[in-house]
Image (cartoon, rainbow, N blue to C red):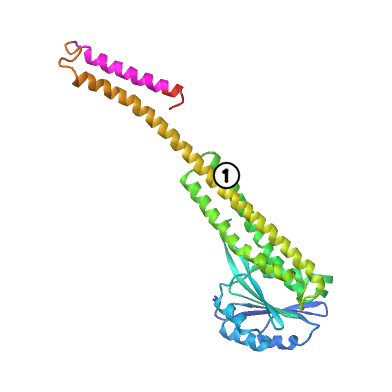
Amino acid sequence: MSSNPAVAQIKMIALLGGVSFERAASLEDVREHLEDPQTVFWVDVLAPGPEDLSALIDLFGFHPLAMEDVANGSQRPKVDEYKGHLYGVSYGVARGTQPNDFHVIELHMFMGRNYLVTLHSEPLLALDEAQNRWTRGSGMLAEGVGFLVYAVLDAVVDGYFPVVDAMELLIEASEEAMVRGPTDQQVGELLDIRRDVLRLRRVVNPMREAFNTLVRRDRSIFSAGTQVYFQDVNDHLLRLLDLIEAQRDLVNSALDASLTIVSNRLNATMKRLTTVSAVVGFAAAVFSAWGMNFAVLPAAESGYGFPIVVGGTVFAVLGGMAFGKKRGWL
């Protein structure tokens, strides 16, 4: 896992007797809460380094294979079960200044009987929202670490909806512009939107399978009451996927429509050019016949011969153009 800050930032939020408190902490400060089953705590580590990962193994007993995945990064969304804890990978989203400016942030989660450890390389606003939801959970806090995991996952999934809504507005604007006639810039914008939609789909779609494993009722570290919350997250994820799939279809339809419009324009242009070529070809045939196929040029001795031929040719050309326009060829 790449790290931006020089030193990892560790934050601990603990729930003691229904009262939560937050403070910056070192991993050694966590040890006193680890053995207390009545305390539910959350350790969030931003930009962990190799020493932090090694300390987590010593403190929590995390499996080395899971920590290797954290160190390497770029893991697919998943939930793996190890002795005494679960290891999950999810992806949150961070928005930029533009509607389609976003990037995803890999989020690693270790879930135990009374703790949650999250690790990520960049700040993730969804975790701040998850903290607010958890600490305001009142009676749902009795569900233990399961409700904490739910709060994190639900905030991560909900963070995608503003991005998807912004993409939908861009698609609608592109469709309206397409009605007035597609330009190269508009087609390029549609291609960019399709790329972003597919990028969202590649991230969100594998999360569905990972979240399905949490819905199973044989997870001993979660209470039975948390299953309904995990099902709620899964429902939100499915709705998000439906929106993304619908947007992908809309973008593809808009691109197909733009190609159809361009093809129709090309056909109309070719029809016009064919008509113009036929009319101009007639004029060329008249001049060729008049200038090259007579031993004595007709009306050559007359001062009005050439203007008559030119005028007649122009009249024939204009007549042909008018006929083509009336028939819809021009």
Counting other residues with Cα less than 10 Å from the Cα at mark 1, is it few (<14), some (14-19), or many (20 or more)? Answer: many
Q: Main secondary structure of the magenta part?
A: helix
Q: Nearer the viewer, residue 33 or 192?
A: 192
Whether residue 144 is visible, yes or no, is yes
- Image coordinates of residue 243 in percent, x first then y, are 65, 54
For the view shown, which residue lies furthest in the top direction? 302
- Image coordinates of residue 261 in percent, x first then y, are 50, 39
Q: Residue at x 66, y 63 (%)?
A: 159
- Image coordinates of residue 122 in percent, x first then y, are 59, 72
Magenta region: which residues? Answer: 302-323
Residue 310 lies in the magenta-colored region: yes
Q: Quadrant of the N terminus?
A: bottom right
188 lies above or below 107: above
SS for callout 1:
helix
Q: Which of 21 and 168 is in front in this view?
A: 168
241 lies above or below 88: above
Q: Which of 12 and 185 is in front in this view?
A: 185
Q: Quadrant of the C terminus?
A: top left
Residue underneath mark 1:
175
Horizontally, is 231 left or right of 169 in the view? right
Horizontally, is 41 left or right of 46 in the view? right
Horizontally, is 133 left or right of 88 in the view? right
Residue 213 lies in the magenta-colored region: no
Q: Which of 166 and 57 is in front in this view?
A: 57
For the view shown, which residue lies furthest in the left direction? 295
Quarter assignment of residue 151: bottom right
Horizontally, is 329 left or right of 143 in the view? left
